[in-house]
């Protein structure tokens, strides 16, 4: 892990807090927030997200509040992408910061998807639609 105030570390702490709220462990979420999220409060790049996380505690149905977006799968994907990029950036063979955004496998799967879509397009949109999740 990078330092304790890195963006990846912050996102992981937020996600842990969010998951505690998701399962209804509000007391644990408050304790965790006081210990871990408090470090990021008042830091300009993180302040808004900390506020949104804490706002989840104020509602009986947090998924319906303005900060409810944090409980969606897309938030988990954002955190996973950030952690993935951080891990890939530790590769000593990485020559530029853009190449650590995707693993070689992810790049190949994206290329496969594009090729299948292009092939279908060239056939007048005839044939089976390609779904990567079915192939995997």
Image: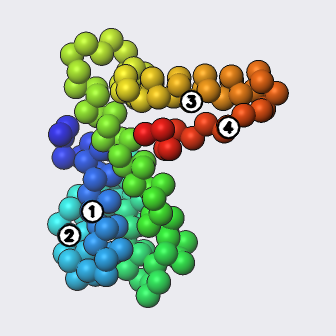
Camera-side residue: 65 or 48?
65
Quadrant for the N terminus in the image: top left
Residue 17: percent from left, percent from top: 29, 67
Camera-side residue: 13 or 113?
113
Q: Earlier in the sequence, mark 1 or mark 2?
A: 1
Q: Secondary structure at mark 4?
A: loop
Question: Which of the two discs, 3 and 1, sits closer to the camera?
Answer: 3
Question: Which of the two discs, 1 and 2, sits closer to the camera?
Answer: 1
In the rendered image, which residue does mark 3 sit on?
113
Residue 129: percent from left, percent from top: 66, 39
Up-down: is 57 above or below 34? below
> Left or right: 107 with respect to 24?
right
Quadrant for the C terminus in the image: top left
In the rendered image, which residue does mark 2 sit on?
32
Q: Secondary structure at mark 2?
A: helix
Marks 2 and 4, how far apart in space?
49 Å
Residue 38 appears in the figure? yes
Q: Are marks 1 and 2 in contact (CB under 8 Å)?
A: yes
Q: Are marks 2 and 4 in contact (CB under 8 Å)?
A: no
Up-down: is 54 above or below 118? below
Displayed quadrant of residue 102 = top left
Marks 1 and 4, how far apart in space?
40 Å
- Disc on res. 128: 4
Marks 1 and 2, how far apart in space?
8 Å
Q: Residue at x 29, y 34 (%)?
A: 86
Q: Earlier in the sequence, mark 2 or mark 4?
A: 2
- Disc on res. 16: 1
Q: Residue at x 28, y 26 (%)?
A: 89
Q: Secondary structure at mark 3?
A: helix
Q: Are marks 3 and 4 in contact (CB under 8 Å)?
A: no
Q: Earlier in the sequence, mark 1 or mark 4?
A: 1
């Amino acid at each position: 892990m990078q330092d304790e105030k890195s963006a990846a570390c912050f996102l992981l702490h937020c996600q842990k807090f969010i998951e505690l709220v998701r399962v209804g462990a509000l007391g644990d979420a408050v304790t965790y927030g006081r210990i871990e999220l408090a470090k990021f409060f008042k830091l300009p790049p993180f302040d808004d997200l900390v506020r949104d996380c804490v706002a989840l505690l104020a509602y009986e149905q947090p998924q319906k509040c303005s900060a409810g977006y944090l409980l969606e799968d897309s938030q988990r994907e954002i955190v996973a992408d950030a952690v993935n990029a951080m891990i890939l950036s530790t590769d000593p063979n990485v020559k530029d910061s853009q190449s650590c955004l995707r693993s070689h496998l992810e790049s190949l799967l994206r290329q496969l998807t594009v090729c299948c879509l292009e092939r279908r397009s060239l056939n007048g949109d005839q044939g089976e639609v390609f779904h990567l999740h079915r192939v995997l």
